[in-house]
Amino acid sequence: MKSQLLKSGVGQYLVTLPAGGSPTSTTVVATAVNNSGDYCNIARWTNTSIYVDCYDGTGVATNSGFNVMFLAKE
């Protein structure tokens, strides 16, 4: 199963990950992928869901492309 991306509002995204093991430690990072000054933050995450919020350079919610890195230690 692949990960999925759902848009829930302006600049708000939910990335769902395939179910896996039970990691003892996880870290998540999101990075906007454009040159306009946008940035993205991780709002919260679980072992299978990552909530990402993106903003423009002035802090207003905006739709932006982004990359997510999810690291897990079992």
Image (spheres, grey):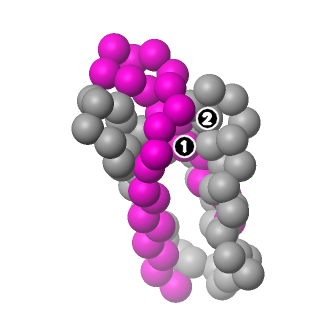
Is residue 64 rendered magenta in the image? Answer: yes
Work out whether mark 2 precedes mark 1 in sequence or the reverse, and give the earlier one. Answer: 2
Q: How many marks?
A: 2
The CA span between labels 2 and 1 is 6 Å
Q: Is residue 57 magenta?
A: yes
In the orientation shown, which residue stands out farthest toward the front? Answer: 35
54 and 21: which is toward the camera:
54
Residue 44 in which image quadrant: top right
Q: Position of residue 4 (x, y in %)?
A: 69, 63
Identity, as a three-letter code, of the amino acid under mark 1 = Val
Vertical comparison of 34 with 72: above or below: above
| Number of other residues with Cα within 10 Å of mark 2, as a class: few under 14, some 14 to 19, many 20 or more | many
Circle 2 sits on which residue?
12
The residue lying at 45 percent from left, 58 percent from top is 68
Which dot marks residue 44?
Answer: none
Of 35 and 32, which appears nearest the observer?
35
Q: Which residues are magenta?
A: 48-74
Which residue is the site of mark 1? 52
Q: Is residue 38 shown left or right of residue 7?
A: left
Q: Do residues under tags 2 and 1 come within 8 Å of each other at their CB atoms?
A: yes
- Left-right relation of 20 to 37: right
Q: Position of residue 11 (x, y in %)?
A: 56, 31
